[in-house]
């Protein structure tokens, strides 16, 4: 087991290095604009642009630039400075991270709490009315675009413009909120919106995974032993069926933290990492984009690692690879 | 016993699989000695039975003989020609003469191909027949193995287990081989179907002067079909000789244990205590 | 005094292609302490019939009728709670593939303890001690260490021993063993069967041994049922079935076994054709299409009864008279179905 973990961690670190190199090369070959003129702004003279180029080290060969970049990264965690605001990229990202983390964790709890039980009940009673209703509803929720869902929920439930039941805080309320509770309250609508499609997906996954598991021989043995149906379904069925869902969860959370919540954050104006990426792309603020991508790679690799380790705890057969 | 040189001659065949371990890079820490120095011969038109339990290495042996996996060392001569070390292209024409029947009739046929494609593929690949000739040859073969020739356009799932095994046999016969290696050809079938398949294989052997290497774990069946038997255990052959002799007066302790363990379908003999 | 009495059991499944009559009017008894062998090929209904005893085939697509009397109660009519009290307690079952029949995520010891604590009021520590005892009883070496192993860490034979330990943990009066050794090597099979025999006599348990292997039945059973296409076609003692069989299917089964007496190049007597589809079985005797001795009467379902006045417990479903059977069942000096050399369909 320890060898399994050690192996995964070492490969994770190696992968991070490879990712950073690839990211660097991509941004070096980034075709859109000259970083120096972006940095200089609109009314810059060719002289100014040239001076900025030198100061950014852009006249150095690529491997020197890469070496400097990596040195800064590994030794000082320095990711460079935003072209737009001159604020350190690391500071910008770390400022935004708590909002995204709060949004994602709340949504994750919600979609698991809603999706998994629905999936279990559907699997235990396949083709029942409950099951069919669930399948149709989930199809609707998965098909609805997140931003549409967000806008509709604001239209119906936001306390400033809501037509149906104006009780939840509206756009921009997260920024205005101060205490933890106020912030949580402002995230209720975003949580539901972000969780909706995922809840549906997880319900369907749980359903199919559990239907498969319940037809396994060991479930038949559990029944033959005289266990209650509830014990059979939960301790023998769900326990096995949940392992592929763990993998899915790790990937989902990893990618969401990396900025995948961009649509939800934009609709509700939450100052998270996704929002940061959106605005940086609009402004071609390369260091910020590069920094977020690197952060994203870090999160995805880390969560993959966590998922691998958790999987080995769940499934003892995996530990001996 | 055999006139002239044997059809197949295997000498000191070895196949080891490395066990790899290590944190970042895989190192070899040990070996699984699947086939550990096996030698035997097969003459034209005869059947050599190889009996072994799971883990004895008999399936690996089949694959190593046919060069489907690369032997670690040793020699395999077919009609005098050395096969070990031959490249894919050199092996290909030789594959016409050596074919294999597999154990599981459910997974050894491609479910997306029709019977005519499955049985016809070897003929096409080796340039034996093509086009409308191919269809006729396939139908001939189907008839010969006891299937209905009109079913050439069906898919494997439309047949029963025994019928699928017949398709597998037809495929093996498509290139008119001289030797067929059968790896547990009847183990996955019901008892009454087993008899049908065994009888079919016997008939074909007489008609086509085929040699068989019949690998199985059921010594009763192996005894019935084989001229000579080799008993395999832990990668080695522990006993070999004429079938009748090996079964009635075994000399090796493992062979004796194997024979003693086989349940006898006669309540007046070999009864267990109590019950 | 019968322990278990099955009367007119019928089980049918609704499938997309139609109704499958998996078990058709099966009746038999099991006495305390005896071993009843049920022999048949795949699809004959032997597994479905046995799983139905424990209610394991109940479901929305299943229709079950008949009676299964155990200790004065009809198991088929029991509610879920009462049935659970019987399962793993009075009547236990072990299955063919011990690797897939044990939960891969839980330790062997935990699974055995679960079986114990479902029916007995013992502490976890007590359950664990009992599990170690049971593993020792079934011959698992170093039981106190291996009790914490996972199923994939056991070899095939060991796993089956562990399953047996788990099944016997509440000292059932009846053990149903569904092809317990089919997935095992023949030397391991011999060990497991010996173990079962030993435990059976020690615990005074009855065993229903389901298998397709006539050799296993000959060596371990007292009485035998031969099943074909959902029906019992012959029932009798071991000696009667093997030395005085009364149904052509039994002759065919016995005949198609390779034996040491048959010369190398002789054909094995074989049963022509394939078992019927249970969606649309032939009217009358199900074996009619494959039986070389079929005649007009066979269009009516033969009842399962004895045609020999001095052995009433030897029953079969065949219209042929006792004399006809005597003449027809020997082919080339041994029991078999038809002259060898007949082609398959």
Image (cartoon, coloured by chain):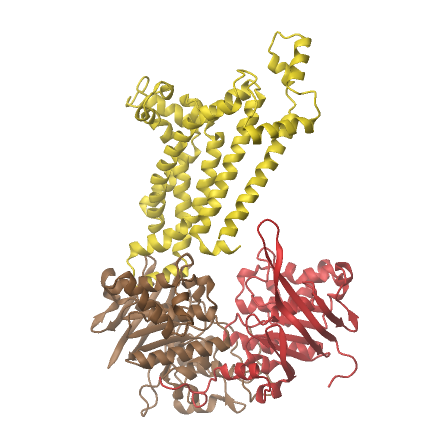
Chain colours: A yellow, B red, C brown
Q: Residue at x 45, y 75 (%)?
A: C212
Name the image quarter holding the C terminus of chain B: bottom left
| Extreme-front residue of the structure | A75
Q: Nearer the viewer, residue A76 or C98?
A: A76
Report how many numbered discs are placed on residues in the image.
0
Relative depth, front residue between A286 and B112: A286
Who is closer to the viewer here, C284 or C263?
Answer: C263
C147 vs B239: above or below:
above
Name the side, left or right, on which A73 lies relative to A208. right
Q: Position of residue C255 (x, y in %)?
A: 50, 84
Picture quarter containing residue A82?
top right
Whether residue C233 is visible: no
Q: Residue at x 43, y 49 (%)?
A: A243
Q: Position of residue B145 (x, y in %)?
A: 62, 71
Q: Is residue B92 above or below residue B257?
A: above
Side of B11 relative to C104 (left or right): right
Location of residue C56 (image quadrant): bottom left
Rendered location of residue A147, percent (x, y): 43, 26
Q: Position of residue A197 (x, y in %)?
A: 41, 35
In the picture, which quadrant includes the N terminus of chain B?
bottom right
The residue closer to the viewer here, C228 or B55, is: B55
What residue is drawn where x is 67% and y is 75%? B212
| Any part of residue B45 in sight | yes
């Amino acid at each position: 087991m320890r060898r399994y973990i050690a192996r995964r961690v070492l490969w994770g670190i190696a992968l991070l290095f490879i990712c950073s190199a690839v990211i660097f090369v991509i941004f070096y070959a980034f075709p859109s604009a000259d970083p120096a003129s972006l940095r200089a702004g609109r009314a810059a003279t060719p002289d100014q642009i040239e001076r900025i180029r030198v100061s950014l080290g852009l006249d150095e060969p690529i491997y020197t630039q890469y070496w400097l970049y990596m040195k800064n990264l590994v030794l000082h965690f320095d990711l460079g400075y935003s072209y737009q605001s001159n604020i350190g990229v690391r500071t910008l990202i770390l400022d935004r991270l708590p909002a995204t983390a709060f949004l994602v964790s709340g949504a994750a709890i919600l979609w698991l709490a809603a999706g998994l039980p629905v999936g279990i009940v559907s699997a235990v009673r396949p083709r029942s009315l409950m099951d069919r209703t669930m399948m149709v509803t989930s199809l609707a929720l998965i098909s609805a675009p997140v931003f549409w869902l967000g806008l509709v929920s604001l239209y119906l439930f936001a306390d400033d413009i809501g037509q149906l039941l104006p009780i939840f805080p509206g756009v921009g309320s997260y920024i205005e909120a101060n205490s933890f509770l106020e912030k949580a309250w402002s995230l209720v609508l975003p949580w539901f919106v972000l969780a909706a499609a995922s809840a549906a997906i997880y319900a369907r996954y749980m359903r199919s995974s559990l239907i498969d598991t319940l037809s396994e021989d060991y479930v038949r043995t559990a029944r033959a032993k005289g266990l209650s149906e509830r014990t059979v379904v939960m301790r023998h069925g769900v326990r096995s069926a949940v392992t592929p869902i763990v993998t899915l969860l790790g990937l989902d959370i990893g990618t969401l933290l990396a900025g995948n919540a961009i649509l939800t954050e934009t609709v509700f104006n939450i100052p998270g990492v996704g929002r940061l990426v959106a605005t940086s792309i609009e402004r071609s603020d390369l260091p910020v984009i590069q920094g977020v991508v690197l952060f994203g790679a870090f999160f995805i690799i880390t969560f993959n690692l966590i998922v691998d380790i958790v999987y080995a705890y769940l499934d003892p057969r995996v530990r001996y690879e | 016993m055999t006139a002239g040189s044997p059809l197949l001659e295997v000498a000191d065949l070895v196949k080891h699989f490395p066990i790899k371990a290590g944190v970042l890079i895989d190192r070899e820490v040990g070996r699984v000695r699947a086939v550990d120095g096996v030698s035997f011969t097969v003459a034209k038109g005869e059947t050599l039975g190889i009996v072994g339990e799971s883990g004895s290495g008999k399936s690996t042996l089949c694959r190593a003989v046919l060069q489907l996996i690369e032997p670690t060392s040793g020699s395999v001569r077919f009609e005098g020609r050395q096969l070990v070390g031959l490249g894919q292209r050199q092996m290909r024409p030789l594959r016409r003469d050596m074919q294999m029947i597999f154990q599981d009739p459910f997974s050894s046929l491609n479910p997306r191909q029709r019977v005519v494609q499955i049985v016809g593929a070897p003929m096409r690949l080796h340039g034996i027949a093509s086009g409308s000739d191919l269809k006729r040859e396939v139908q001939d073969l189907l008839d010969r193995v006891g299937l209905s020739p009109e079913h050439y356009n069906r898919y494997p799932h439309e047949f029963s287990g025994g019928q699928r095994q017949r398709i597998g046999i037809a495929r093996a016969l498509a290139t008119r081989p001289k030797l067929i290696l059968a790896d547990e050809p009847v183990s996955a079938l019901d008892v009454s179907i087993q008899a049908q398949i065994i009888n079919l294989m016997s008939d074909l052997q007489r008609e086509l002067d085929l040699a068989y290497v019949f690998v199985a774990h059921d010594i009763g069946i192996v005894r019935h079909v084989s001229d000579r038997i080799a008993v395999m255990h832990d990668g080695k052959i522990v006993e070999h000789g004429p079938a009748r002799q090996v079964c009635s007066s075994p000399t090796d302790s493992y062979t004796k244990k194997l024979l003693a363990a086989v349940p006898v379908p006669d309540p007046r003999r070999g009864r267990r205590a109590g019950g | 005094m019968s322990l278990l009495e099955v009367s007119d059991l019928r089980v049918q499944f609704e499938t997309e292609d139609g109704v499958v009559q998996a078990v058709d009017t099966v009746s038999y008894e099991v006495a305390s302490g005896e071993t009843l062998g049920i022999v048949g090929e795949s699809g004959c209904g032997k597994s479905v019939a046995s799983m139905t005893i424990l209610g394991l085939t109940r479901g929305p697509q299943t229709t079950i009728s008949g009676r299964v009397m155990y200790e004065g109660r009809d198991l088929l009519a029991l509610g879920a709670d009462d049935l659970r009290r019987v399962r793993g307690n009075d009547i236990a079952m072990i299955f063919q593939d011990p690797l897939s029949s044990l939960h891969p995520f839980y330790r062997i010891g935990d699974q055995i303890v679960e079986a114990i604590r479902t029916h007995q009021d013992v502490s976890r520590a007590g359950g664990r001690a009992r599990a170690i005892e049971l593993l020792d009883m079934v011959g698992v070496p170093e039981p106190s260490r291996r009790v914490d192993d996972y199923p994939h860490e056991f070899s095939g034979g060991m796993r089956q021993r562990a399953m047996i330990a788990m099944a016997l943990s509440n000292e059932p009066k009846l053990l149903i063993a569904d092809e317990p050794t089919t997935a095992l090597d023949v030397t391991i099979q011999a060990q497991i069967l010996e173990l079962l025999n030993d435990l059976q006599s020690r615990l005074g348990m009855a065993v229903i041994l389901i298998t397709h292997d006539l050799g296993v039945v000959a060596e371990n059973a007292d009485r035998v049922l031969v099943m074909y296409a959902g029906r019992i076609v012959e029932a009798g003692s071991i000696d009667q079935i093997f030395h005085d069989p009364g149904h052509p299917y039994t002759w065919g089964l016995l005949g198609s076994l390779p034996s040491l007496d048959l010369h190398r190049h002789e054909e094995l007597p074989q049963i022509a054709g394939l078992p019927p589809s249970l969606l649309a079985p032939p009217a009358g005797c199900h074996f009619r299409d494959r039986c070389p001795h079929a005649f007009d009467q066979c269009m009516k379902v033969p009842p399962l009864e004895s045609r020999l006045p001095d052995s009433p417990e030897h029953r079969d479903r065949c219209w042929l008279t006792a004399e006809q059977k005597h003449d027809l069942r020997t082919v080339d000096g041994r029991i078999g179905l038809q002259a060898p050399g007949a082609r398959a369909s």
